[in-house]
Image (cartoon, rainbow, N blue to C red):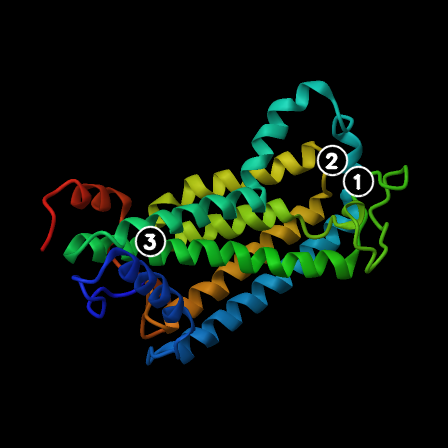
Amino acid sequence: MPDTATIAPRASYPTQLVSVVGRALAQLVRSPSHSRRAAAARKLARHSLWLSAAGAALVIVLMLAFDGTEIQLMPARGTAWLWPIRILTDFGKDENVLWVLGAALVVVALVASGMHGSRRALLLGFGTRLQYLFLSVALSVFVTEILKYLIGRGRPFVGGKADPFNFIPLEGTGAYASLPSGHAVTAFALAFAVSALWPRLRVVMFTYAVVILLTRLVLLAHHPSDVTAGALVGMVGAMAVRYWFAARRLAFAIRADGSIVPLPGALPGRLKRVAGGPSAP
C-alpha cells in the first residue's frame, strides 16, 4: 500500500480512507521504474520457460502412464469416512482464500486510515504485501478458469469409467473442468507468494500446498496430472506478479543479476510490536 508522505495527516477519516485506497490502487498501475527490471524480466522468462517445459512433460507422462491407475486406487467418491478430507480441502478453495485476503486488505485500509507516522507506514507496508498475495492467487485463478474452459477435461470417472483422455473442449461445466486443478493452483500460488515474501515460511507453506493437492486426489476430484498442472500454473502466476511488484519497487528489490528478493520490514511480529507501542505523531 502507499507511502504516507503524500497523505495529509490532518484530513478527516473518510478523506484519509479514500486517499489510502486510491493510492494503494494507483501504485499497482504506475509505470515501472526499477533500473534492473529488464534483467529481472529475462530471468523470469527463462525460469518460466524451463518450469513450464518440465511441468508439461511431467503432465503428459502422468496422463499416459499413471492417471488411470491412480484414480482406481482411491476410495469411492462420497465415502463417509472422508469427511475430514472434505473439510481440509476447502482450505485450498480459491473463493475462501481470496475472501480471507480481501478481508485482510479491507481491515488494513480501515485501520491504517486512522493511524499516523511510523505505525501507519508499517501497516501500509504490510498491506502492500497482502496485495501481492491477493493478486498472485487472483491472476492464477483467472488464467485457470480460461484453461479449464478451453481444455474441457472430464473429472475422474465422468462418463462411467477411468478414462484419462475424456476431453470435451469448450464444454464449460464443472464435470469437464478437471485440468488444471483450481485448488492446486490456489495453494501453490499462495505458497510461492508467501515464501517469496517470508522465506522462513517456505517449508510450512509448501507442505500446506502438497496436502491440498493430495486431498484433491483422495476425493477423486482430479487426476494426478491435473494437480501437477495446477501447481505449475499457480507458481508461474505468482512469479509473474512478483515481477510486476518488483519492477515498481513494491515489496521486492531486484539484484544486479536479475534476482528478485523481498524488501525488509512489515513482518507480522514487528507489526504487532509497533501497534502495541505509543502512537507516533
Secondary element at tag 3: helix
Residues at circles 2 and 1 in contact by the CB criterion of under 8 Å = yes
Report whether 111 appears left or right of 201.
Answer: left
From the image, which quarter does the N terminus lie in?
bottom left
Q: Amino acid at mark 3?
A: Ala
Whichever of callouts 1 and 3 sits on the residue coming sooner in the sequence is: 3
Please identify the residue farthest to the right as the structure is shown: 160
Horizontal arrangement in the rendering, residue 123 relative to residue 25 (left or right): left
Dot label at residue 109: 3
Q: Secondary structure at mark 2?
A: loop
Q: Quadrant of residue 59?
A: bottom right
Circle 3 residues within 10 Å: few <14, some 14–19, many ≥20: many
In this picture, residue 138 sits left or right of residue 148: left
Report which residue position mark 1 lands on: 156
Q: Position of residue 218 (x, y in %)?
A: 68, 32
The x, y position of residue 189, in whole percent, is 52, 52
Distance from disc 2 to disc 1, alpha carbons, whole Å, reads: 6 Å
Q: Residue at x 31, y 58 (%)?
A: 17
Q: Which mark is residue 220?
A: 2
Q: Is residue 24 visible?
A: yes
Tell me where residue 78 sits by quadrant: top right
Q: Secondary structure at mark 1?
A: loop
